Structure formats: structure tokens, C-alpha cells
Image (tube, helix red, strand yellow):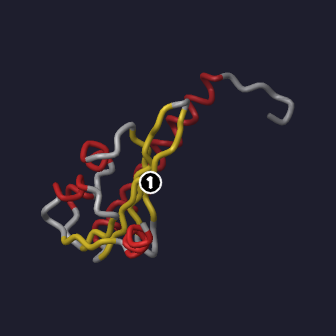
């Protein structure tokens, strides 16, 4: 980088440091999502190191929070730290795992409904 070599250890240390510095911002994003009346949730499969991983998304018009997890279902949704505490309207694709969250109201995403209708 700019004629200098950077060790793996330095990169790891910087990543850990930046991660710690971002925690307050991350908490603000989570709080904003939890306070939103409607949140759209989605999970999309993707390949990471030749294995299927799941990109979980919680989004509002203002903010989006994403995390990658090895699983698609409830364990992964819990890891996102939104759905277990969310009490608003959860818009999603109807994946069965969402039914475990009973403190929120569920609505189906029109894009998914239209895809299902087209068969």
C-alpha cells in the first residue's frame, strides 16, 4: 500500500480497533430500526468460501442493517438482534421462521407475492 507492506497482524489489529469504534454507531442503527413502525426483513443466499451463507437484512427508509450468518432461520435472525425485540410491523417473504416472533405484526412483501403468483 503506497509502497509499504502491511502485515496481516496489523490489518487484524486495525479491523478490531475500527470494529470497536463503530459499536456506538451500530447501536444507533439498531435503535432506529427497533423504533420504526415498519421494517422490511429479508434473507438472501450467497456463496462465501464455497459455502452457502445468508445475508440477513433489516431495513427502513432511513437505515439498513445487514449481517451474514451460516443459517437462514431463527438462530440467524436472533443473531441480528432486531426481530427478538421488534414490536412493529415486520414485512417479509413469509419464510416460516418469522412466525416465531409473536411480538410484532406480520405482513407479506408484495414483490414476493407477485413472484409467487407468476409461478
Q: Nearer the viewer, residue 14 or 38?
A: 38
Q: Badge 1 local density, few (<14 within 10 Å), some, or many (20+)?
A: some
Q: Say which residue appears at 18% left-offset and 58% top-offset.
A: 99
The percent position of residue 46, horizontal first and vertical second, equals 51, 44
Circle 1 residue: 66
Q: Quadrant of residue 94?
A: bottom left
Q: Which residue is farthest right?
A: 3
Q: Say which residue appears at 46% left-offset and 47% top-offset.
A: 45
Q: Considering the image in quadrants, where does the C terminus appear? A: bottom left
Q: Which residue is farthest left?
A: 102
Q: Quadrant of residue 1?
A: top right
Q: Nearer the viewer, residue 30 or 75?
A: 75
Q: State whether residue 67 is above or below residue 109.
A: above
Q: Nearer the viewer, residue 86 or 48?
A: 48
The percent position of residue 37, horizontal first and vertical second, equals 28, 77
Q: Which residue is farthest front?
A: 119
Q: Nearer the viewer, residue 94 or 55?
A: 94
Q: Please, what secondary structure does the residue beneath circle 1 have? A: strand
Q: State whether residue 110 is above or below residue 46.
A: below
Q: Say which residue appears at 31% left-offset and 70% top-offset.
A: 91
Count of numbered labels shown in the rendering: 1
The percent position of residue 82, horizontal first and vertical second, equals 29, 57
Q: Quadrant of residue 65?
A: bottom left
Q: Say which residue appears at 44% left-offset and 54% top-offset.
A: 66
Amino acid at each position: 500500500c503506497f509502497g509499504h507492506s502491511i502485515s496481516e497482524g496489523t490489518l487484524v489489529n486495525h479491523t478490531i480497533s475500527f470494529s470497536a469504534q463503530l459499536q456506538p454507531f451500530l447501536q444507533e442503527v439498531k435503535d432506529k430500526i427497533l423504533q420504526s413502525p415498519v421494517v422490511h426483513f429479508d434473507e438472501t443466499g450467497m456463496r462465501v468460501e464455497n459455502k452457502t451463507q445468508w445475508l440477513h437484512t433489516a431495513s427502513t427508509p432511513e437505515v439498513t442493517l445487514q449481517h451474514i450468518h451460516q443459517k437462514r432461520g431463527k438462530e440467524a435472525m436472533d443473531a441480528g438482534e432486531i426481530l427478538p425485540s421488534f414490536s412493529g410491523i415486520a414485512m417479509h417473504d413469509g419464510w416460516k421462521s418469522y412466525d416465531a416472533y409473536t411480538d410484532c405484526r406480520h405482513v407479506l412483501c408484495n414483490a414476493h407475492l407477485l413472484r409467487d403468483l407468476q409461478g
